[in-house]
Image (cartoon, grey):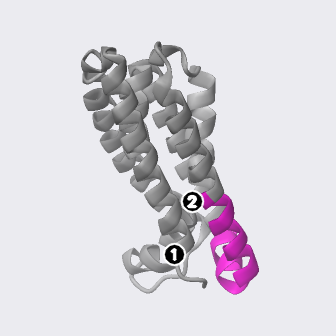
Amino acid sequence: MAWLAGLAATEGKRNGMAAVAGVAVGLLANGALAALGLAALLESFPALWNGLRIAGALMMVWLAVEAWRGAGNETPAANGTTGRAFATGALINLLNPKAYLFFVVVAPQFLGGETLSIGNALLLSVISTAIATLIHCAIVLAGARAQGWLSDPRRTRTVRRIFALIILGVAASFLLTPVR
């Protein structure tokens, strides 16, 4: 969410909404992959879980480095394209171990004792994606409103560096997620 707000604030609403679309596709893919057994596979094989955690953390570190490096740019809106924002949003969710953990730990609580089938995994995925997308859109709209305020390069540099540090915190949380 911090990445979405920072992206919209520094690169505009269009890139922010492209990222929201990518995040939504990633969330839907998480649900479909969980329905096909990836969540159970990750739970059964700690090495795969560890690989996903590390890949997710590395992705977040890469985003943090990009945000930090971009902090000195004079024209923040030129930093990325909508295609890149979309792809990054999708990849963030595909490499997010906590998204899969949702289907192993949280989802069963909503199933009334049923096992996670393809149908109910996809239904939960659509519902959670719809809720998340509404929240993400609101975050992007709020972030985009700050874009004018960020026309001062010093403010942009400070905000991008703050977001870089927050993103590093997310990377750390991926690494601190217990091995399954």
**Residue position marked by numbered label 2 in the rendering:** 96
**Magenta segment boundaries in residue numbering:** 36-57
Drawn side of residue 24 relative to residue 132, left or right: right
Q: Quadrant of the C terminus?
A: bottom right
Would you place residue 59 above or below residue 154 in this image?
Answer: below
Q: Could you say which quadrant of the image residue 117 lies in?
A: bottom right
Q: Name the residue under label 1.
A: 176
Identity of the amino acid at label 1?
Answer: Leu
> What's the magenta bit mostly, secondary-structure-wise?
helix
Cα distance, mark 1 to mark 2? 13 Å
Does label 1 or label 2 sit earlier along the sequence? 2
The answer to whether residue 72 is magenta is no
Q: What residue type is labelled 2?
A: Asn
Q: Can you give x and y, in whole percent of width and height, for residue 33 in the image?
A: 66, 61
Classify mark 2: residues with Cα within 10 Å, few (<14), some (14-19) or many (20+).
many
Residue visible at 24% across and 19% down in the picture: 149
Position of residue 88 in the picture relative to residue 19 (left or right): right
* Residue at 50 percent of width and 20 percent of height: 73
Name the image quarter holding residue 11. top left
Residue depicted at x 53% and y 67%: 174
Secondary structure category for the residue under label 2: loop
Queried whether the magenta region covers residue 47, the answer comes back as: yes
The mark tally for this picture is 2
Residue 148, given in percent of the width and then of the height, sits at: 27, 15
Image coordinates for residue 109, horizontal then vertical, percent: 39, 80
